[in-house]
Image: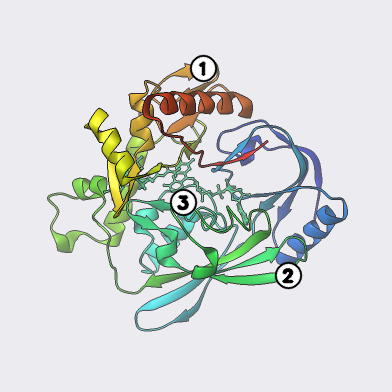
Amino acid sequence: MLQLLPDYCLQRHNTLAIKAVAREFAEIRSVADLRDALKYANSRRLPLLALGGGSNIVLADDFPGLALHIQLSGREVIDENDEFVWLRVGAGENWQRTVDYCLNFHFWGLENLSLIPGSVGAAPIQNIGAYGVELKDLFAELQAMEVTSGVLVNFDRDACEFGYRDSVFKGRFRDRYIITSVTLKLRKEPKLVLDYPALRQALEGITADAITPELVSQTVCDIRRSKLPDPAVIPNAGSFFKNPVVSGAELARLKARFPDIAAFVLGQDSAKVAAGWLIERAGMKGVSRGKVAVHDQQALVLTNPGEGSGKDLLALANEVVERVQSIFGISLEMEPRVYL
Ligand code: FAD
Ligand code: NAP
């Protein structure tokens, strides 16, 4: 039975620990709950906020509608052949617990995506990626409920239009669907991806046959713990900005002025510039502004150690954007979804 809680503080539901209040809040534990909640919100014209772990959102103000904490659970092998298993996972399952589950059952492929916070249902929204692997590499399909009609729809890989930290759910279909489950296509034999520099470096000296998926996962966890602030200790939302993509000509222009710029060629005429490098060079690494700060180990991460507001964070983010723009002529784009 759907239970609606009025004036609900979302501090525990976002990893920046912002004290925004939702007009109403509900836990969604079944597809029937979700349908009821959508009917309720539609009949009152309430805006909706789908919440997983709240690790990729900035609540810049109180939310004037219904926040739905998606708790749909369950993991089930729905098909297999000699090479692959297809694992359907409820949208509310925790991502890292799902990675651990797969390692335990020897369903391989998620190793490099270890220790990313949040839920399985949010993973397709920005096609989560780390250490050279993206969700799309392991993705088979997802099921989602259309907000206006309550109809369940399946999306295959092409339909999700995955891009770099991007999908159709951040663009054309933003706020149009709530994801209810994700089906992953995982390997029965490991196929390790070890070319990401930090990972390669950490595994240096270990013989190839000793490098197992479990070791890769553990190594990724170790690197992440050594570099990234734990949101439970220092509230943050991971990378606050996307790595900007520039043309070949633009990269040449930048390299002439900044020969040591951290950039990675993507295709014939495009390159990805490390946003963290730009922010550090702009002199913003480690700066604090009142209750919020740019992390002193990783400039891409903004933190909220002093229980600042969403507006405090956005003011700092704007200062970073302006500094980077004035020095490099590059416009940084925020990665988390901002709710104004
Ligand atoms: P939320 O923050 O709850 O939601 C994010 C967006 O998705 C919101 O717009 C929300 O409405 C929507 N949404 C959530 N669930 C659903 C659903 N079921 N249906 C429809 N819409 C939904 N990201 C990476 O890609 N790679 C990383 O390596 C990485 N590392 C991180 C490290 C740290 C310390 C932190 C704090 C974040 C990191 N992130 C990373 C960002 C974040 O963890 C991911 O984007 C994650 O997938 C967000 O999951 P969530 O459940 O917390 O989403
Ligand atoms: P890092 O290893 O210090 O590298 C800095 C940046 O350079 C990364 O953003 C990465 O891009 C890019 N990069 C490095 N080597 C590359 C290569 N060989 N080819 C292409 N791009 C390369 O990064 P980090 O901050 O410690 O993060 C490690 C991984 O975890 C990265 O993949 C990062 O995306 C992911 N992560 C993401 C978040 C988030 O919130 N989105 C938070 C923490 C970590 P990519 O980002 O494209 O990989």
x and y, in percent, of residue 124 in the image: 52, 58
Q: Which mark is residue 289?
A: 1
Residue 262's quadrant in the figure?
top left
* Residue drawn at (30%, 42%) of the image: 249
The picture places residue 196, in percent across and down from the top left corner, at: 26, 51
Q: Secondary structure at mark 2?
A: loop
- The residue positioned farthest toward the right in the image shown: 43
Q: Earlier in the sequence, mark 2 or mark 3?
A: 2
Q: Which mark is residue 151?
A: 2
Q: Which part of the image, by quadrant, shows the C terminus? A: top right
The three-letter code of the residue at mark 1 reads: Arg
Which numbered disc covers residue 176?
A: none
**The N terminus, quarter of image:** bottom right
Asked if residue 46 is positioned above or below residue 177 in the image, the reply reads above
Residue 78's x, y, as percent? 52, 78
Relative to residue 189, is residue 237 depicted above or below?
above
- 3D distance between C-alphas at marks 1 and 2: 46 Å
Q: CA distance from mark 2 to mark 3?
A: 27 Å
Q: Is residue 283 left or right of residue 121?
A: left
Q: Reading the chain from its start, which is encountered first: label 1 or label 2? A: 2
Callout 3 crowding tier (Cα within 10 Å): few <14, some 14–19, many ≥20: some
Q: Quadrant of ligand 2?
A: top left
Q: Quadrant of the rendered structure where residue 226 is?
A: top left
Label 2 near ligand 1 (CB < 8 Å): no
* Quadrant of res 312: top right
